[in-house]
């Protein structure tokens, strides 16, 4: 399956649920068939026909067991780089008959892990989900959120969850006398424009850590005409 073009809401946003941004799945009601950690992997989901584990067919994503109690499953993702959300992609690729028919997303801003009495706000209402497909959903959350609760109804498997948005740093938690990387995505730095991005994702150059390989960053096509390539970065403060 070829990769579709990203919708407008994602084209100038970053994936806040990326492990590269420090995101982590901290809780799931059930992960019997496939681990919750796979839900936010940066790599594209893959299907390996002859791969099995102790729970049956190995699937590249998060998959819960079948519920028979009338409830539904959910997981909680810590968005270490909290921010506003422009839209999401509930990616069910390779989940053809075991995907959840519906899903929803809630969010909250908290200084500690959510508890039973945490107040959540609706980000994505209960929405019908297609199997084996990208499910792009545009939203507009003006609130800064750093935890999201991903609900699937009633159960099933999802390959990847992408939360597209813009990080908003909590500067009050930073040392005012310290030195900070103002171009970093986690500190609000973002790319305003560039002349070419034939290879890779430009925003990756503003993410923490070292690149894993030559494709992990911004790369332009070879120039056969005069001039130079460029990228414009807005600082977070």
Image: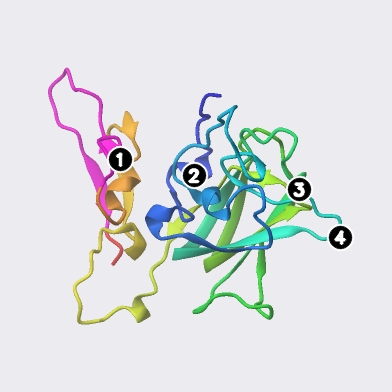
Q: Mark 1 against mark 4, which lies toward the viewer? A: 4
- Res. 119 visible in picture: yes
Mark 1 and mark 2 in contact? Answer it, CB < 8 Å: no
In primary-sequence order, the first of circles 4 and 3 is: 4
Q: Nearer the viewer, mark 4 or mark 3?
A: 4
220 falls in the magenta region: yes
Residue found farthest to the front = 54
Q: Main secondary structure of the magenta part?
A: loop
Which residue is the extreme one toward the left?
226
**Picture quarter with the N terminus:** top right
Which residue position holds label 1?
A: 216
Q: Nearer the viewer, mark 2 or mark 4?
A: 4
Q: Which residues are magenta?
A: 211-234
Q: Residue at x 35, y 76 (%)?
A: 171
In which quadrant of the rendered image does the C terminus lie? bottom left
Where's residue 166, x and y in %?
Answer: 44, 57
Mark 4 and mark 3: Cα distance apart in space: 17 Å
């Amino acid at each position: 399956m070829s990769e579709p073009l990203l919708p407008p809401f994602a084209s100038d946003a970053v994936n806040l649920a990326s492990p590269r941004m420090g995101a982590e799945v901290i809780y799931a009601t059930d992960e019997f068939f496939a681990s919750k950690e796979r839900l936010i992997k940066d790599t594209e989901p893959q299907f390996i026909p002859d791969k099995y584990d102790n729970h049956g067919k190995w699937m590249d994503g998060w998959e819960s067991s079948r519920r028979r109690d009338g409830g539904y499953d959910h997981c909680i993702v810590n968005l270490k780089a909290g921010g506003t959300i422009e839209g999401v992609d509930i990616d069910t690729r390779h989940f053809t008959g075991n995907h959840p028919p519906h899903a929803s997303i809630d969010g909250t801003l908290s200084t500690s892990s959510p508890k039973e009495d945490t107040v959540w706000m609706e980000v994505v209402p209960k929405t019908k989900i297609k199997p084996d497909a990208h499910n792009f959903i545009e939203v507009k959350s003006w609130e800064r959120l750093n935890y999201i609760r991903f609900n699937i109804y009633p159960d099933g498997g999802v390959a990847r969850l992408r939360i597209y948005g813009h990080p908003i740093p909590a500067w009050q938690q930073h040392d005012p006398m310290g030195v900070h990387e103002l171009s970093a995505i986690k500190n609000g730095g973002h790319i305003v424009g560039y002349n070419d991005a034939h290879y890779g994702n430009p925003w990756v150059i503003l993410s923490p850590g070292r690149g894993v390989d030559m494709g992990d960053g911004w790369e332009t096509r070879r120039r056969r005409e005069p001039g130079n390539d460029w990228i414009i970065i807005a600082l977070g403060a």
